[in-house]
Image (cartoon, rainbow, N blue to C red):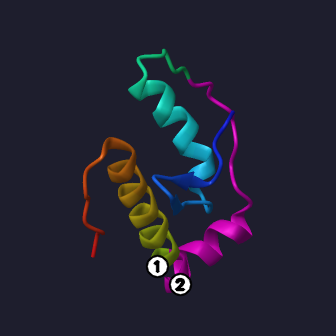
Amino acid sequence: MDYTGEINGKEHDRWESILVPVWQMMINGKKVRSVVVPYEPPAEQTEIEETDATYDMKRVEQLNAFVITLGELLGEEFKPVR
C-alpha cells in the first residue's frame, strides 16, 4: 500500500487510510473483495454509543471526511453532510 496520507497535496490521514487504498484500486479497475468477519461489539460499548450523542457527531465527522476525500480522489468537490 502506498497511501501517504495526502491527496492532491492535502493531508488526509485520519480514517481515510483504511478506505483510500481500496477506492484507488476500484478506480483503477481492480477487483476488490471483502471477507465477512463475525464480530459483535461488547454490550457496554453498544450501550454507550447508542446513548451518547458525541458518538453520533463522530460518525457524521467520519462520513464527511470520507465524502470530501472521495471527491478529491475523483477530482470533484463534494460538499460535507450537515
Is residue 14 or residue 72 the one in the foreground?
72
Identity, as a three-letter code, of the amino acid under mark 2: Thr
**How many angstroms separate mark 1 from mark 2 (CA)?**
5 Å
Q: Which residue is mark 1?
A: 57
In the image, residue 8 lies at what x, y percent? 45, 52
Which residue bears the numbered disc 2? 54
Q: Number of numbered discs present?
A: 2
Relative to residue 62, is residue 18 drawn left or right? right
Left or right relative to 29: residue 12: right
* Residue 13 circle label: none
Quadrant of the rendering where the N terminus is positioned = top right
Is 43 rendered above or below residue 23? Answer: below
Q: What stretch of residues is rendered in magenta?
A: 34-55
Q: Is residue 36 above or below residue 43?
A: above
| Position in image of residue 71 (x %, y %) | 32, 51
- Tell me which residue sits at (47%, 75%) in the image: 56
Label 1: how many Cα within 10 Å (few below 14, some 14–19, many 20+): few
Q: Nearer the viewer, residue 79 or 32?
A: 79
Residue nearer the viewer, 55 or 77: 77
Foreground residue, 2 or 38? Answer: 2
Asked if the residue at tag 2 contacts the one at tag 1, i.e. Cβ–Cβ closer than 8 Å, the answer is yes
The quarter holding residue 74 reads top left
Residue 27, position in %: x, y?
39, 28
Q: Residue at x 42, y 55 (%)?
A: 69
At 70% from the left and 69% from the top, the residue drawn is 45
